[in-house]
Amino acid sequence: MNLKQFTCLSCAQLLAILLFIFAFFPRKIVLTGISKQDPDQDRDLQRDRPFQKLVFVIIDALRSDFLFDSQISHFNNVHQWLNTGEAWGYTSFANPPTVTLPRLKSITTGSTPSFIDLLLNVAQDIDSNDLSEHDSWLQQFIQHNNTIRFMGDDTWLKLFPQQWFDFADPTHSFFVSDFTQVDNNVTRNLPGKLFQEWAQWDVAILHYLGLDHIGHKDGPHSKFMAAKHQEMDSILKSIYDEVLEHEDDDDTLICVLGDHGMNELGNHGGSSAGETSAGLLFLSPKLAQFARPESQVNYTLPINASPDWNFQYLETVQQIDIVPTIAALFGMPIPMNSVGIIIPDFLQLLPNKLASMKENFMHLWKLSDHHGEVALDDFTAEDIYTKMYTIQETLTKSATNYNYPLLTLAFVGFLIITIIAIYVLLRYSRPDFWQLRVSSLSVLLVSIILGVSTFASSFIEEEHQLWWWIVTAFSAVPLIVYRLNVLIIVRWFIMMACVRSIKFWNNSGQKFIYSNVMSNLLNQNPYWKWCLNMSTFLVLIMASAGSQVLHFIVTTILVGLCFTYKISWEIVNGNQAEIPLFMHDLLAKIDFAPTESNLIVLARVFFQAWAIVVISRLVLTKLKVLNKNYLIKDMKVYITILLMFQTSSQNIGQFLVFQILESQIFYFFQNIPTASLTSTSKIYFSNLVSLILQNFTFFQFGGTNSISTIDLGNAYHGVSSDYNIYVVGILMSVANFAPAIYWSMLPWSINYASIPAQVKLQTFIRSKLPAFTYHCIFGTCLMTACVVLRFHLFIWSVFSPKLCYFLGWNFVMGLLNGWLPELALLCALD
């Protein structure tokens, strides 16, 4: 197989994956049009509606315990209002995927999101996110000639036309390193655009992002979280005080909610209890005139809850129930695609609660494909609600309309590619096709084990355990292949110590969290963490000393820039107390002031310097100005520095362990008995070891198969608030796949160090076959599992995220990282 053929095969594989995903994640079919009422009925409802003004406050990632639990909540004013009955509180269940864009669609339209909305959450500029033609409570307010003002997360302006808003001041939602200015940009508009112009608007939407950004950076127990709670609480008090100052204060409703929660790592996107349990609060002096929710009467807020409460405080409602509740309280028809149910506690506020219940029931009845009227006169309110809950459960769990023809085309195409990949792998392993070599058999065995595991949701959630078992099994190979002596045994013990250290470094998987892992211990002992980080950087400089002088100089410069940035980043983000004093002195000696603006400049200087160094090294080697014998080693050092730049401080020390482990593996490959391996088998084995370590370290870096563990905190180095989504996407990919990228370089020195130039391309193709075949077999099994288990309870929370990760592995690691750096290297070596 030549390079052109293999390129076509790789592109066809990626195309088949994309087709399968688009067929498996089609857009939900929604009803077009806008709900309308009889003009006379509409006029009466508008006249008698309980509230005239709505202040809709979203505090992004406001988990339920942030509002209600005494052990973590600092919303003191909220607690007081809950106890006096001026506020009614709930835990709202947010259907996964728990990311902002699909949650906003649900909160405004009352429909359940499709999983493809998770992908669209990143690609927010595409037209398919537009809800201007879809019914929502915003659409209903517009139809009833109400004035809407908006401040906050710019995702709203991707969903709704800007002309709908009398005033709009958006902020970027993905700039997660900022959790101060992003909220100040919202609050600064309150005096002028809300308080002083109180009579000029009917609906105000405020979307605060800072709390969510703190979660992504430091988790729910961050030292910044208490102050953010107090800030949000004081903002709510200022709004409520303004309500009380007006004569018609009884006619204003403040609705406060989180669009989703967060897990114990501060991330979201999955289906854990913390991610799906958001806080919900309705606040108005009028509410004190009515009976409080029964669940609220039984408690004095804040609640001292035990862990087995599982974030379920007071009464739990569906988040989509907000939509018909707002519609009823403001005398509007329920939006066309809403599957929500009016929260029962609010029926007592409605002028005709029986008519509102019947309208809600008939709306759900028609959505569930029933026709004709239903006689509800003989049913009690409890009976009607029981029937509505049954219909709602059916509608929210209804399966997506899969595109079966496209699914079949994609799957058959992928299966054909898999058969070709297996054939080519075996053909290269030995001239006699049917006599399998151990190397190719090992590739197939690992692929089949991981492929079969995709049929069990628990194995997908805990995939890191499979890679740990595989790493452990392969670690025994040196004891079998080599003639044992003291040196071999010592190196083997060092290798095993490194592997065990990596396993101990971070929590991984989705079921269990341990407190005594290395990353937590390092965060608790910042002095030793930074000493370890400094040692890791120094080892890189020392390793470059054996190369050419120019390489040593540029490595020292890049390491200096990287280390200075990592220290400064911690200081700017409020962790200056964690930085050892001698490192503060170092910054003072180089006269660098760690400010946010200087940090952006420093990061850009690093990226520019890194790009210049890498490109210059390749070009000068191609022109034979620099010695090509050092190129592979030098390039690995440069890429490692970039990976460390994109890595969180508690994980930088892993790269020191990686370098020690790599030196042991390289020794074993260089000294393997020549009779044991052919050249092709050696290529297969080195790339199989690389593949295993890529996956093993990806999970031990803190990665999982859940969307919620995607690292966004390192995706904004050098990015200003006016960010570019493509730059952020590249930085995010490097940050999340950093350990995998490191181990993808392992075979370079083994495969390309001492082979003639004319066989380098064939070596490249053979080196890609193990990973390519693995992804083909694994992908075939995963696609089969997704189709067979498409009605499984965890299809959207477990299998679908894994399908997205599979696309990421193939595109980022298989195509971009697997081809571009290596081909550039071979071109320079030629």
Image (cartoon, rainbow, N blue to C red):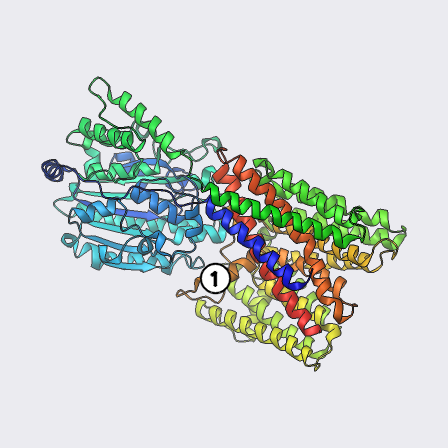
Disc 1 target residue? 728
For the N terminus, give its image quadrant: bottom right
From this viewpoint, is residue 608 visible? yes
Residue shown at 74% from the left, 44% from the top? 472
Which residue occupies the foreground of this view, 595 or 45? Answer: 45
Coordinates of residue 101 in the picture (x, y in percent): 38, 49
Coordinates of residue 261 in the picture (x, y in percent): 42, 43
In the image, residue 621 above or below residue 14: below
Which residue occupies the foreground of this view, 584 or 599? Answer: 599
In the image: residue 472, left or right of residue 357:
right
Coordinates of residue 208 in the picture (x, y in percent): 34, 52
In the image, residue 596 above or below residue 810: below
In the image: residue 768, left or right of residue 142:
right
* Helix, strand or loop at mark 1: helix
Count of number-bearing discs: 1
For the C terminus, give its image quadrant: bottom right
Coordinates of residue 91 in the picture (x, y in percent): 37, 36
Q: Amino acid at mark 1?
A: Val
Residue shown at 39% from the left, 33% from the top? 313
Which residue occupies the foreground of this view, 435 or 591? Answer: 435
In the image: residue 301, left or right of residue 72:
left
In the image, residue 64 above or below residue 633: above
> For residue 326, which quarter of the picture?
top left
In the image: residue 417, left or right of residue 108:
right
> For residue 819, which quarter of the picture?
bottom right
Which residue occupies the foreground of this view, 572 or 7? Answer: 7
